[in-house]
Image (cartoon, grey):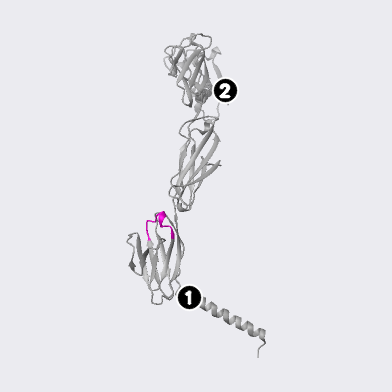
Amino acid sequence: MLPPALSLLLLLGCLGASSGNLSRDESQPTTSDETVVAGGTVVLKCQVEDPDDSSLQWSNPAQQTLYFGEKRALRDNRIQLEKSTPNELTISISDVVLSDEGEYTCSIFTMPVRTAKALVTVLGIPQKPQIFGHEQPIDEEKIARLTCRSSGSKPAAQLRWRKGNKELKDEGTEVVEDPNGKTFTVSSRVEFRVTKEDNDAEVTCTVDHESLQNAERSTTQKLQVHYKPTAKIEPHPLYPREGEKLRLQCDGQGNPVPQEFLWEKEGSDTPLQLSSDSVLFFPFLNKSDSGTYVCTATSSMGSVVAKYNLDVSDASPVPSTSGPYHAVIGGVVAVIVFLLLSLLIVLGHYLIRHKAGVCVRHGETVTSRHRQKPAEVMCTYLTHEAKGSDDAPDADTAIINAEGGQASGDDKKEYFI
């Protein structure tokens, strides 16, 4: 016989097992909650292990029957039957709208009737954001105040800013429910000081929302910043000469661009030119035109002065960019002259060492270049000073005349042994 305490434990275990078996109802239908983006398609699936010879039924949040088994109950072409068996009833709803959101009921008509709920959540897609506050140009060093707004999101969307590639921190976000009572309008504000470098800078507002499925939806606007002008004077041609034409271009930059240009010459009381033309023209330069010329460029943001010193009397300087070319040309010429001089020196030296001459050997006359054997040979070099050479009609006569005048001692002689 078991002790009373052990008997009690066994009894409790049996009761627990019995209650567990009873709690499992194979005729109880099962469903799942679904989330769908507005405009998409949602699929509702209802399953049961033991239908008990009964049919499954789907009904909408308004308790209108959509399908009873394979039979359509509500005339809505968006709702289609996907699968109908004794153990499963699956339907789909296309082109979902916000009003489709709510609890859908799957029922099986057993004794008693069993039901299961499926919550359908419809996400409202936020509209493309809009940026306000950039319509008018902003003066440099002033504060830009921009607002970004996006409507139609459900739940409320998130907005973020950037200028170029730099993130901007917003000054605050406001969420307002739309008139339909289901979606929201979100607004965000940013403030920052602008400089002239911000002119044409791109400011972007981006909306983040789960309905976009990681796709970015944004709007970009360019800033217009007004800033003071700058100016510089550029001469054409760059190196003017007396008697030439000259154009002085006052190149004014800014936003807005300067529209008025005042030309003056230092030391002169009378302005030279005041107009929207930024060019001062000299049809024929004189030395008296030399001096310092002043251009004052004016826009709605202020004025700026640029100066140019004109010296007509000075010769046209050689542009620095052409200096290397002249240096190369000069070097080539110097090398050529050096080679020519070297060639002349070598040639002269060669001629001096190789003067034409004659040699007398045993009564024979031979040239000094044809000596073959060691012998006593007398060679006479004929120069312009050799007697009879100037009046001789040919070389042979000149040699004979030179031999005849050897006794005078004026000819140069050389003996070889």
Position of 26 relative to 304 (above/below):
below
Q: Is residue 402 visible?
A: yes
Name the residue that disc number 1 marks. Answer: 25
Q: Which residues are magenta?
A: 93-102
Could you say which quadrant of the image residue 50 lies in?
Answer: bottom left
Q: Position of residue 5 (x, y in %)?
A: 67, 84
Q: For this rendering, which residue is in front, 376 or 139?
A: 139
What's the residue type where badge 2 is placed?
Tyr
**Cβ atoms under marks 2 and 1 closer than 8 Å:** no
Q: Position of residue 307 (x, y in %)?
A: 52, 17
Q: Residue, x 46% and y 9% (percent of image)? A: 286
Three-letter amino acid code at disc 1? Asp
Q: Residue at x 35, y 59 (%)?
A: 78
Q: Is residue 95 magenta?
A: yes
State which quarter of the image contains the C terminus. top right
Query: Can you identify the residue that label 2 sits on?
Result: 415
Secondary structure type for disc 1: loop
Whichever of labels 2 and 1 marks the residue nearer the N terminus, that label is 1
The label nearer to you, 2 versus 1, is 1
Estimate the x, y position of residue 138 in percent, counting from the top left.
50, 31
Is residue 221 on the magenta stretch?
no
Of 241 and 12, the residue lying toward us: 12
**How far apart are the alpha carbons under marks 2 and 1?**
149 Å
The local secondary structure at tag 2 comes to strand
Viewer-proximal residue, 128 or 51?
51
